[in-house]
Amino acid sequence: MNPHDPDNPIQHLFSEQRAADQQRAPSFQRTWQAAMTRAEQPARMPWLLPIAAGACAALIAAAGVFWWPHAEKPQPMLPSTAVAFLSEWTAPTDFLLEPLTSSMSSGTQP
Amino acid sequence: MDDNTTRSQLAELHPAGYGWALACCGRDPAAAEDVLQTACLKVLQGRARFDGRSSFKTWWFAVIRHTAADERRRHWLRRLRLAAFGALQSDRVHEEAFGDALDCEQRQAAFAKALAVLPERQREVLHLVFYQELSIEAAAEVLGVSAGTARTHYTRGKQRLRAWLQQAEVSHEPARSRQSDPALVL
């Protein structure tokens, strides 16, 4: 180790920390045994909650999709007088569209 | 790799794994032990399996790190309370005594608090390099980042730790000089 290395104090602190941790570390036997005990216990099914939440969301979405086409769509409201007026209206240039024969048969010639 | 070989390798790595679990759990011994148990449980249930793509130590450290992250997510409320406590404590980091007159325990407490102030990635990479004596490339593999990213975190973390060390030494210089000069003691 280079005595002038600026990393030395940091290395020393970490080494000290490692030594202290190793004194406090639980034995591997204890950790492994605890894991074995947990492995033997029945599963708590932690995956059940997200699945239930997903199912609920899917149900709500399906209900929405089913309801949407059957929903009564609002019709645009027109006043009845306006409808009547539109059905009776004729354009001033409508006579131009009439066939020529009809005007000849009407006896307009001198 | 059979179960007995895996178990013996895990036993061999246990002290180092405990140190890494402590680093991943904000130095909380109970949480670190719980994380190690859960990581062992994953191995027992076959949810974590060594596939030989990296070294066994790198793989095991990555399992511990992922397990600690899962536990942290699960206990986010508890973590919020700890973070609030940590913020209060971090203000006092530079006021902590750090000098020859202090014993190892006090120095370590101050060091742990200084580490706690560092961003998580910087803290992790410094731990892996200095505490676990891994190379930066191996540390990058454990953290799941590129070697360049790990190197950046390493450099920045080291700079901050050096600054903290300098500040701690300067702030305790008067105390040291009083001890070294008998005339000042009286």
Image (cartoon, grey):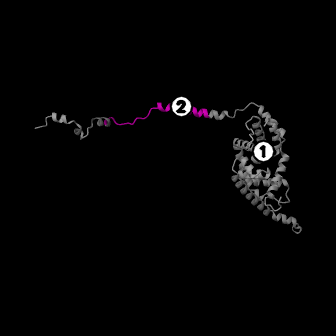
Q: Is residue A60 magenta?
A: yes
Task: Identify the residue position indicated by label 2 in the image.
Answer: A63
> How far across and how far down the image is residue B175, in percent?
83, 63
CA separation, marks 2 and 1? 52 Å
Q: Is residue A81 left or right of residue B47?
A: left
Task: Give the residues drawn in magenta, as a range.
Answer: A54-81
- Identity of the residue drawn at 87% across and 66% down: B180
Q: Residue at x 79, y 54 (%)?
A: B111
Q: Secondary structure at mark 1?
A: helix
The C terminus of chain B, quarter of image = bottom right
Q: Chain of mark 2?
A: A
Q: Which secondary structure dominates the residues rendered in magenta?
A: helix
What residue sits right under mark 1 in the picture? Answer: B57
Residue B67 on image: x %, y %: 73, 42
Give the percent coordinates (x, y) of residue B48.
74, 38
Could you tell me which chain the residue with mark 1 belongs to?
B
Would you say residue B98 sits in the magenta stretch? no
Labels 2, 1: one chain: no
How many residues crowd mark 1 within 10 Å: few (<14), some (14–19), many (20+)? some
Which residue shows up at 55% across the image and 34% down it?
A: A61
Q: Is B61 placed above or below B96 here? A: above
**Residue contact at pointers 2 and 1, CB within 8 angstroms:** no
In the image, taking residue A3 as reference, residue B116 lies left or right, namely left
Residue B129 horizontal side relative to residue B181, left or right: left
Going by the numbered disc 2, the residue's amino acid type is: Ala
A95 sits to left or right of B10:
left
- Foreground mark, 2 or 1, reads 1
Foreground: B3 or B115?
B3
Q: Position of residue A62 (x, y in %)?
A: 54, 32
Q: Secondary structure at mark 2?
A: helix
